[in-house]
Image (cartoon, grey):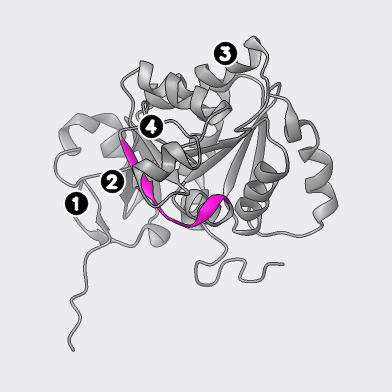
Amino acid sequence: MNKQKYDVTRDPVCLMTIDPRQAEAMTEYKGQAYYFCSEGCHQKFLSQPDIFIDKAPGMRLTVGVMGSATGEFAADIKELVYTLGQDIADRGFVLITGACPGLPYECARGTRSKGGLSMGISPALSLDEHVHKYFSPADVFDVIIYTGSGLMGREVVNIRSSDMVVIVGGSSGTLGEFAIAYDEGKIIGVLEGSGGITTQLPQLVTSFGKDTGAQVIYESDPHLLISKLAEAYTAHHYKHPSCFCEGEHASVG
């Protein structure tokens, strides 16, 4: 059977077909990713982006927020994570969470308040199971993906669907999500001041003793955290978004 080969993306300036990992430059504009065949095209785009954005569509970048789904949370921590959701929306990024209560829900509320796009990756088979078996909310999401994978199974989907990952609070479940993101070479933000495992992660990362290509950024200001993640992603991380990309950090474990 003949299989059709599809274009990955196009340079919005010269319209050349590009594999994102082979692009000479990349930028994020209004939450969307654009890739360029040369620095010249990149600079032309930056000088007048609105001229070029309709010539080749950009793909929305995603931020996965992983954190505590249960427990009591101080008002200042809830506000911090709510603000994170607002900052994600303001940048035009798509929020991804596990569609769960707790801190990820507060983040989704923040995104919703700014009219941002929020996607939940549910462990359930259906909306009925999502609400009645997993006791999870559905009121702040634009889209819910029902994986039927259970709480642990959907974690891999969460991480692999996220261009950037942010850890807020959390305990053992969130630590598992962090481990997946780290082993798969993701760019990871840690929201300092949100409690939970965020206080332990610097020491844990030091103890790992291996390079997967992951980059961890620590920041207590949600706005600065999102800005730093976006800057790092567009500067270099887009070339190796996963350790499973061919030729990039192929060994994990």
Residue 154 image label: none
- From the viewer's perspective, is the residue at label 3 or at label 4 nearer? 4
Which residues are the magenta region?
143-151
At mark 1, the secondary structure is loop
Give the x, y percent position of residue 172.
Answer: 72, 44
Q: CA distance from mark 1 to mark 4?
A: 43 Å
Is residue 244 rendered to the left or right of residue 1? Answer: right
Looking at the image, can residue 174 be seen?
A: yes
Q: Quadrant of the N terminus?
A: bottom left
For the point 43% across and 21% down, which residue is it?
109
Q: Identify residue for label 3.
A: 79
Task: Give me the residue at 52% from left, 53% from top.
Answer: 150
Query: Mark 1 touching mark 4, by CB under 8 A?
Result: no
Work out whether 206 lies above or below 221: below
Quick one: label 2, few (<14), some, or many (20+) residues within 10 Å?
A: some
Q: CA distance from mark 2 to mark 4?
A: 42 Å
Q: Secondary structure at mark 4?
A: loop
Say whether marks 1 and 2 touch (CB < 8 Å): yes
Element under label 2? helix
Local packing at callout 3 (Cα closer than 10 Å; few below 14, some 14-19, many 20+) is some
| Alpha carbons under labels 3 and 1: distance apart | 44 Å
- Quadrant of residue 174 within the rendered picture: top right
Q: Quadrant of the C terminus?
A: bottom right
**Residue 186: percent from the left, percent from the top?**
57, 51
